[in-house]
Amino acid sequence: MQAQPTLQASPRPTGAQVGWARHLRPAGRFVLQFIEMCAAMCIGGMALDLVVFQGMALLGYPNFFQDNRELSILTVGVNFAIAMGAWMAVRRHPRRHNIEMSSTAVIAAVLLIAAYWWAGFAPATTIPGWFGQVAFQCGPSCALMGAYMLFRYKHYTGDAGHKAHQMA
């Protein structure tokens, strides 16, 4: 008769390992939330921009974006904010966080308009037309959104006690 192998208990994690896990899990959750929010804002905003700018072309303004640069940049920012707000409502974020987070896209648009007016800054993009601007504007909007998320770090890691954000 052969001896049965015995099951050995896995060694208990050391204090250092437990400490790292305690910090890595919220940081990973934060990064995933950031990626999710950027994707929702940029993809949803681009879809809304497609509707707006193609609609303007159908109404007889095929060069609306080039002829009205500042208004178009603001439109892109507002569309990003609408997409972000809709996604955050689906994810059941508190209204206050929804408004604050969505406003970062509009703030980024205002900063880009100011850079365009005062410094003559126009994005150098290889993508022609409004889509190039939208793709360019996604970066600054995500950067401001990331800064806001760092300001509300506990909320976006689930450490703030919000039931809608706690993983089961």
Image (tube, rainbow, N blue to C red):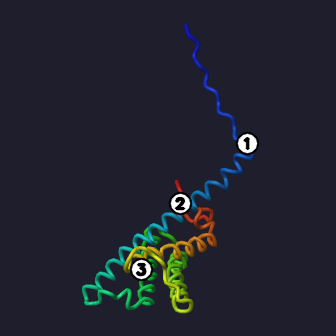
Residue appearing at x 69%, y 38% in the figure: 12
**Nearest to N terminus: mark 1 or mark 3:** 1
What element does badge 1 sit on? Answer: loop
Residue appearing at x 46%, y 81% in the figure: 77
**Residue kind at label 3, given as amino acid type:** Asn
Q: Which residue is mark 2?
A: 32
The answer to whether the residues at label 3 and label 2 have Cβ atoms under 8 Å apart is no
Location of residue 143 (image quadrant): bottom right
In the displayed structure, 24 sits above or below 17; it is: below
Q: Position of residue 1 (x, y in %)?
A: 55, 7
**Nearest to N terminus: mark 3 or mark 2:** 2
Q: Is residue 166 left or right of residue 59?
A: right
Q: Nearer the viewer, mark 2 or mark 1?
A: 2
**Which residue is farthest right?**
15
The numbered disc on residue 79 is 3
Location of residue 60 (image quadrant): bottom left
Looking at the picture, tell me which residue is in the foreground, 16 or 162: 16
**Residue kind at label 1, given as amino acid type:** Thr
**Residue kind at label 2, given as amino acid type:** Leu
In the displayed structure, 110 sits above or below 30; it is: below
Q: Position of residue 53 (x, y in %)?
A: 33, 82
Q: Which residue is mark 1?
A: 14
Looking at the picture, tell me which residue is in the foreground, 112 or 164: 112
Local crowd size for mark 1, using a 10 Å CA cut-off: few (<14), some (14–19), many (≥20): few
What element does badge 2 sit on? Answer: helix
